[in-house]
Amino acid sequence: MVERDEFGRKIVYVSGRDIPSRPKWNKHINNLVEEGQMEKAMSAARDMMNLGVEPDVIMFTTLIKGWCKIGKMSVAMHVTKVMLKMGLYPDQITYSHLIQGYCQQHDMMTAKRLLESMIKVNLIPNIITLTQIVKALCNMRLVGDATILVDTLLKSDTKPDVITFTTLLRGWCNVGDMKMAYKILKSMIELGYEPNVVTWNVILHGLCQQNALSDAMHLVETMSATSDAKPNVVTFTTLVRGWCKRGDMEMATKVFDVASKMNVVPGVVSYTTLIRGWCEKECEDRAIEVMKRMKAAGVRPNVVTLTTLIRSYCKDRNMRAAMSLLETMRRTGLRPDVHTYTTLMQGWIELKNMNRAMDLFKQMKRNKRVRPDIVTYTLLISGWARSMKRMDMAEKVMQDLMNDRNVSPNDRTFCALIRGYSCLFHGDRNWRAERMYFWLCKMRDLRIQPTHHAVKPFTCMNLYFPAVDEPFWTTDFGMSFDPHRHGRRRR
């Protein structure tokens, strides 16, 4: 921590009295962690110790929290080991951050080991930590294991709460097992837990996902009539989305109107959901009516709202209307995002107007707030390669991507480029094969594993594709494709 006086001059400490206290160091390190400046936080911790200030569990836990937050679990564990070497032991908060970090990385074995270590040193995990484990198991679709854990908690001193049960219910709903979800809901109520509006909304979402809209409507009626947890804006938006997904826009509109009559004020997400439904039915005029109603109600359309309309116009090949909405966004102070630009580019590519698509791409690159992502690059490469048969331009976009520090190509990007050569029937076959192997080598050198999509263009041209366990993929990084070395078929 560098301190400066009112003139900006660096303060040099000359005695122990000038050195900031440990709480000041901890606050400074915590501020750096909250800002995501982990290297500076680590440097500040080293400075603190070099100045003779003894670290404490709070400082180490703060650093561990920061590394866990950005998914650098190996560094978080290294900090934990340094902490232990200094005779400081993790507390309940330290363990909670580590367990949550590993849960987010879907490393449940390590999370379980940490939980066991925690219990061994008589630290009782709180329900927040345990609910995080339930959530991680559900996210991995291990809902059976999550249910066993909740059953275990019911027999322990750390009882599950409504959030724990709601998390478990969401897991069963997400795997489409509504019968099990209702069974858990029944058990929850019998045990004296009162479902809140979030719990009911989870069940409602599950029913809508299963297209059980009659049951969903009945649930909302029950909530309105008998439950203390009254339907809210999320409830009605979920139901509107369910009817839109089915394609019944009259029912979607009816539910939307019922919400207003029950003093549930629709928000931007509610209006955008209804607008998207009308756009999916190719009824842009009805979508515009909803947007006018939205503005009259004092709800300002956001980027997602207008991008939804733009996507619909692009599907109808009405690019004049789509571009007009882009100008409206800019004029009203809304910043188009990467999805807006990519949607418009796709519209122009469908019309084989690559020049207009490239104009939008250049606008994105000039804009410091919006950067092309991997979907943008892959779309352009596919447009030049497949729609226009311009492999020179497709390669140019790929080179731009390789030089972009913020984005890296993936298997889909390489497949789009390689597929372009396999479909270029008027080109020299040997030259096409040479370019395909050239980009396959680039793909390998970036340690990108091939999928069946990468194999298909080679099969179509009756070209050899090295197996993933052959030297081409395992050891020969940086080497060009050599038909004598890499082209041998395995016996």
Image: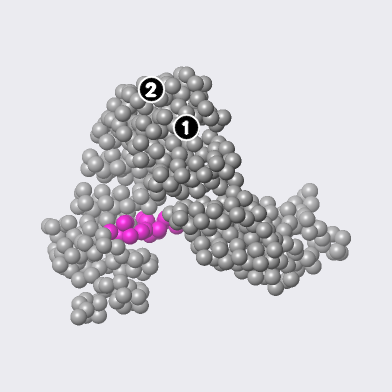
Give yes or no for residue 452 being in the magenta stretch: no
The relative height of residue 297 versus residue 328 in the rendered view (above or below) is above
> Magenta part of the protein: which range?
399-415
Looking at the image, is mark 2 or mark 1 earlier in the sequence? Answer: 1
Residue identified by numbered label 2: 254
Q: Who's the residue at 26% across and 60% down the image?
A: 453
Q: Who's the residue at 38% across and 46% down the image?
A: 176
Give percent across and percent down for residue 236. 45, 29
Quarter of the image that includes the C terminus? bottom left
Q: Which mark is residue 148?
A: none
Residue 454 appears in which quarter of the rendering?
A: bottom left
Residue identified by numbered label 1: 235
- Left or right? Give the position of 20 relative to 240: right
Q: Who's the residue at 78% across and 55% down the image?
A: 23
Q: Nearer the viewer, residue 239 or 221?
A: 221
Q: Nearer the viewer, residue 326 or 247?
A: 247
- Left or right? Give the position of 39 relative to 361: right
